[in-house]
Image (spheres, rainbow, N blue to C red):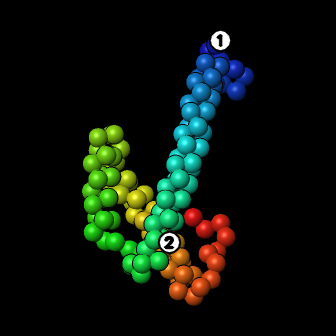
Amino acid sequence: MTSNTSPSGVDPAVREELARLRDSIDNIDAAVVHMLAERFKCTQQVGHLKAKHQLPPADPARESRQIARLRTLAENAKLDPAFAEKLLNFIIAEVIRHHESIAEDTLNGTEPTAHRP
């Protein structure tokens, strides 16, 4: 142990830097959650529009364009494009599931399930 380390063996400056970085991560996580919430608010509106006009819940051509677009954005941002694609595929699957539920509710004349994006 050096003279500038705490009893637990970690330099206080390292602990401070770790705390600063973790605070940034927490803020980014909060922003991601809020952005996803906004995205799902928009996709819910899309789902209602599709249901009203009897359009299919999925749009494979758009999904392919979005994946290609997101991969390019990821590459430019120095993020693994495969990871970005997996994330978008997960989001798309959830959106389609919601659109299917909205379409079913619309067809049955029932109220959409509460708290569903």
Q: Circle 2 sits on which residue? A: 48
Q: Estimate the x, y position of residue 30 in percent, counting from the top left.
A: 59, 44
Q: Say if residue 16 shows up in the picture.
A: yes
Which residue is depicted at the point 65% across and 66% down? 115
Residue 113 vs residue 74: left or right?
right
Which residue is depicted at the point 64% across and 13% down? 4
Q: Which mark is residue 3?
A: 1
Q: Amino acid at mark 1?
A: Ser
Residue at the far front: name it: 53
Q: Which mark is residue 108?
A: none
Secondary element type, mark 1: loop
* Mark 2 surroundings within 10 Å by alpha-carbon count, few (fewer than 14), some (14 through 19), many (20 or more): many
* 7 is higher (above) or lower (below) than 97: above
* 6 is higher (above) or lower (below) than 111: above
Q: Identify the image quadrant of residue 24.
A: top right
Disc on the earlier residue, 1 or 2: 1
Which residue is depicted at the point 72% across and 22% down? 7
Q: Nearer the viewer, residue 2 or 40?
A: 40
Residue 88 vs residue 106: left or right?
left
